[in-house]
Image (cartoon, helix red, strand yellow):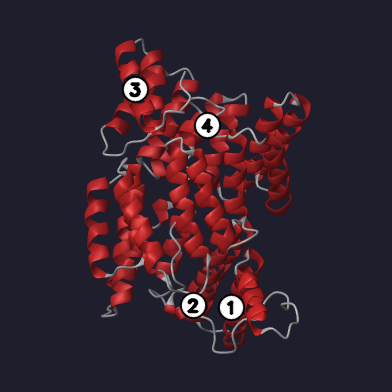
């Protein structure tokens, strides 16, 4: 299992890079709202029936599918792209298309969608007057791709634009708070998250503050915020609601509560059938519950749909544990090829899972360390520090790893993963007393955590 089979390695890297919980669903910006028109048609017609109740239930079931919700986004993209192309001179119009591709990328997980978002952002700026353009859209794109070194100038320019719109002010404040969180500026992030939630009780702010509490080991506060967001959600797309249930499951997973985690995942699955993101977490739990045949079938299906190397690694680990070493190595090799492609295309976004792969299955710890250093330079949060410490230890630099992990422990963030990493590093540095204290701290959060 990719989070637990690597002992103090993969288990300890799960949120340092792209393995972090996806960002909270955000509403489509006003300028990117779909053009007026009839409601999107289902991806396929519901069964013909004279029973209106059955027909309504069939439509509702169709609405709660990944394909349907992706098709709705595609309709919006097609409509906005036509408007932008027909006009041909509006940077705002092309920026609106970029926003929609960002929304699609969040759902699809495809680097192709990020590339399209970047293409339309570039076109928007090429058409905008000097000193103008969709600065906030580009800032969000670079934030999502972990290119935080490119964010500040655009965010500053966007923030200087005069507005009295409460929604715009709220989005700016929340963006700043999330940026601070990613940079490990936790005191500032907590202050601004509280302020954003005071301004507007919206899902995105509730989820961001919940994530802060979760990563600080304050699970009760996090769960209360996620459940409040669930209770208050009223929009049509079911994916954001499914995402909230997924977060509750991930918190249970981090505490070793596998049955409870699976129950949350099943709730999420019922809200958006066929969504690879939820299914891969179900496969993860099935593996932990020794339901390996079900997990293997699900992983193979997800790989067919996504070509995602993370799941190739997960399948390889499952097969290796079952004694199928030759096929496992084939999947590791395929994953390596895909990671190389991702690193060439969007390196900052790929560092997290690529590092996890190369530490676990590669033979070049120096290269893994270089990736970890670059990732940490961009986003010096506690997860990136943990990532870096693991890479330093693997590269034979236990003293460097000790300095890095103690910097992570000096933050308010707490997790079983962090304490397990610290235990391994203290042990490698000959401090068994501190190593044992960290093992006990890890077990207190997750009794099932694997320790060296």
Cα–Cα gap, marks 2 and 4: 38 Å
| Residue 400 visible | no
Expressed as whole percent of the image width and height from the top left, the position of residue 428 reads 41, 14
Q: Residue at x 21, y 55 (%)?
A: 191
Residue tagged 3? 440
Q: Secondary structure at mark 3?
A: helix
Cα–Cα gap, marks 1 and 4: 38 Å
Residue tagged 2? 32
Q: Secondary structure at mark 4?
A: helix
Mark 2 and mark 4 lie on one chain; the one further toward the N terminus is 4
Expressed as whole percent of the image width and height from the top left, the position of residue 103 reads 53, 66
Expressed as whole percent of the image width and height from the top left, the position of residue 46 reads 71, 77
Q: Is residue 229 left or right of residue 262?
A: left
Mark number for residue 214?
none
Q: Is residue 178 left or right of residue 371?
A: left
| Residue 315 visible | yes
Camera-side mark, 4 or 3: 3
Mark 2 and mark 1 lie on one chain; the one further toward the N terminus is 2
Mark 2 packing: few (<14 Cα in 10 Å), some, or many (20+)?
many
In the picture, which quadrant includes the N terminus? top right
Q: Residue at x 59, y 46 (%)?
A: 282
Mark 1 and mark 3 lie on one chain; the one further toward the N terminus is 1
Cα–Cα gap, marks 2 and 3: 50 Å
Q: Secondary structure at mark 1?
A: helix
Residue tagged 1? 76
Confirm or deny contact between disc 1 and disc 4 (CB under 8 A): no
Q: Is residue 85 above or below residue 383?
A: below
């Amino acid at each position: 299992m990719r989070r637990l089979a690597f002992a103090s390695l993969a288990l300890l890297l799960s949120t340092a890079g792209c393995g972090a919980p996806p960002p909270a669903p955000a509403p489509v910006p006003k300028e990117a709202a779909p053009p007026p028109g009839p409601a999107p048609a289902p991806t396929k017609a519901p069964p013909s029936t004279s029973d209106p109740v059955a027909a309504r239930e069939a439509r509702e079931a169709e609405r709660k599918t990944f394909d349907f919700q992706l098709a709705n986004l595609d309709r919006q993209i097609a409509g906005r792209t036509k408007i932008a192309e027909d006009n041909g001179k509006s940077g705002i119009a092309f920026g609106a298309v970029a926003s929609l591709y960002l929304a699609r990328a969040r759902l699809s997980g495809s680097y192709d969608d990020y590339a399209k978002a970047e293409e339309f952002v570039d076109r928007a700026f090429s058409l905008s007057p000097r000193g103008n353009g969709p600065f906030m859209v580009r800032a969000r794109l670079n934030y999502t791709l972990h290119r935080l070194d490119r964010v500040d100038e655009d965010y500053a320019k966007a923030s200087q634009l005069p507005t009295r719109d409460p929604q715009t002010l709220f989005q700016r404040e929340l963006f700043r708070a999330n940026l601070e969180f990613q940079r490990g500026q936790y005191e500032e992030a907590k202050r601004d998250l509280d302020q954003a939630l005071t301004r507007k009780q919206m899902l995105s702010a509730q989820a961001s503050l919940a994530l802060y509490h979760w990563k600080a080991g304050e699970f009760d506060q996090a769960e209360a915020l996620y459940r409040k967001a669930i209770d208050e959600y009223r929009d049509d797309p079911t994916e954001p609601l499914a995402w909230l249930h997924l977060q509750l499951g991930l918190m249970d997973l981090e505490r070793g509560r596998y049955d409870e985690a699976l129950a949350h995942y099943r709730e999420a699955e019922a809200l958006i059938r066929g969504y690879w993101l939820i299914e891969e977490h179900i496969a993860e739990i099935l593996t932990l519950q020794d339901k390996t045949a079900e997990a293997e079938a699900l992983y193979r299906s997800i790989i067919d749909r996504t070509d995602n190397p993370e799941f190739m690694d997960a399948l390889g680990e499952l097969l290796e544990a079952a004694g199928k070493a030759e096929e496992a190595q084939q999947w590791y090799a395929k994953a390596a090829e895909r990671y190389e492609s991702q690193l060439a295309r969007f390196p900052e976004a790929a560092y997290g899972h690529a590092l996890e792969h190369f530490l676990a299955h590669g033979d070049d710890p120096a290269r893994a360390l270089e990736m970890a250093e670059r990732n940490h330079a961009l986003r010096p949060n506690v997860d990136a520090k943990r990532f870096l410490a693991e890479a330093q230890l693997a590269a034979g630099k236990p003293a460097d790893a000790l300095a890095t992990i103690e910097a992570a422990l000096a933050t308010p963030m707490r997790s079983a993963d962090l304490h397990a990493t610290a235990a391994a590093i203290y042990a490698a540095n000959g401090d068994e007393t501190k190593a044992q204290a960290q093992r006990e701290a890890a077990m207190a959060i997750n009794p099932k955590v694997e320790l060296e």
